[in-house]
Image (cartoon, helix red, strand yellow):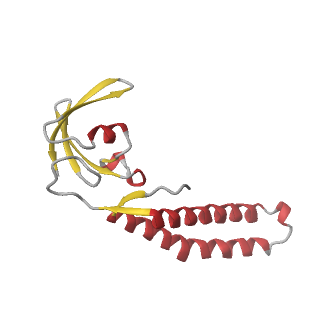
């Protein structure tokens, strides 16, 4: 990973710490035991369980390293309330195609379209950043242009 900071909400940081704890305290010890048990079964060149256990352990080790770095470099963003323009941590209600939708603007690692969490670096996130209530934006998507009207920033 590079040296840049990662933006996370306090909830997102808690989730990463929780995942790291599960990997370190539960999954990694079980996988180490699984590797040792598979190793005891003899010829490693023909031992598919040993190979699979080592691959699983390598994946967990990589994720532990990745999470550790993310947590170390995380910059916690606060949920912004009472602000007049869209910033990281804000919720934004927009009107698009006659329907209202509310999005939370978060960092890349927390973005989840199914939960209406959009990254500040996504096309919509970038277009919303710095905008104010009643501003209108237009986003180019594969199907054409989509117009958004900002109704509320909360």
Residue at image point 32% right, 42% down = 125
Residue 108: % across, % down: 41, 50
Answer above or below: position of 132 versus 19. Answer: above
Which quadrant of the figure has residue 81? Answer: bottom left
Tell me which corner region of the image, top left, top right, bottom left or bottom right, holds residue 139: top left
Say whether residue 37 is left or right of residue 86: right
What is the count of numbered marks?
0
Residue 148, compared with residue 104, is above or below; it is above
Query: Percent position (x, y) of residue 103?
Result: 26, 46
Rendered view: 25 above or below 133: below
Residue farthest along the top direction in this orientation: 144
Taking depth in this image into account, of 5 and 120 the one nearest to the observer is 5
Residue at the spot x=38%, y=41% of the render? 122
- Left-right relation of 72 to 106: right
Relative height, residue 76 to residue 95 (above, below):
below
> x, y (%) of residue 89?
27, 55
Between 131 and 12, which is closer to the camera in this rendering? Answer: 131
Quarter of the image containing the N terminus? bottom right
In the image, residue 16 lies at what x, y percent? 44, 65
Identify which residue is drawn at 49% across, 73% down. Answer: 21
């Amino acid at each position: 990973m590079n040296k840049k900071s990662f933006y996370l909400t306090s909830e997102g940081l808690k989730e990463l710490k929780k995942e790291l704890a599960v990997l370190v305290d539960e999954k990694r010890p079980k996988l180490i035991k699984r590797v040792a048990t598979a190793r005891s079964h003899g010829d490693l060149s023909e031992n598919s369980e040993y190979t699979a256990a080592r691959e699983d352990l390598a994946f967990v080790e990589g994720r532990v390293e990745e999470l550790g770095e993310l947590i170390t470099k995380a910059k916690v963003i606060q949920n912004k309330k009472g602000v007049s323009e869209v910033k990281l941590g804000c919720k934004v209600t927009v009107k698009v195609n006659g329907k209202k939708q509310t999005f939370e603007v978060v960092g890349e690692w927390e973005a989840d379209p199914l939960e209406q969490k959009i990254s500040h670096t996504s096309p919509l996130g970038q277009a919303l950043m710095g905008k104010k209530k009643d501003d209108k934006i237009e986003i180019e998507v594969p199907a054409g242009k989509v117009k958004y009207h900002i109704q509320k920033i909360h």
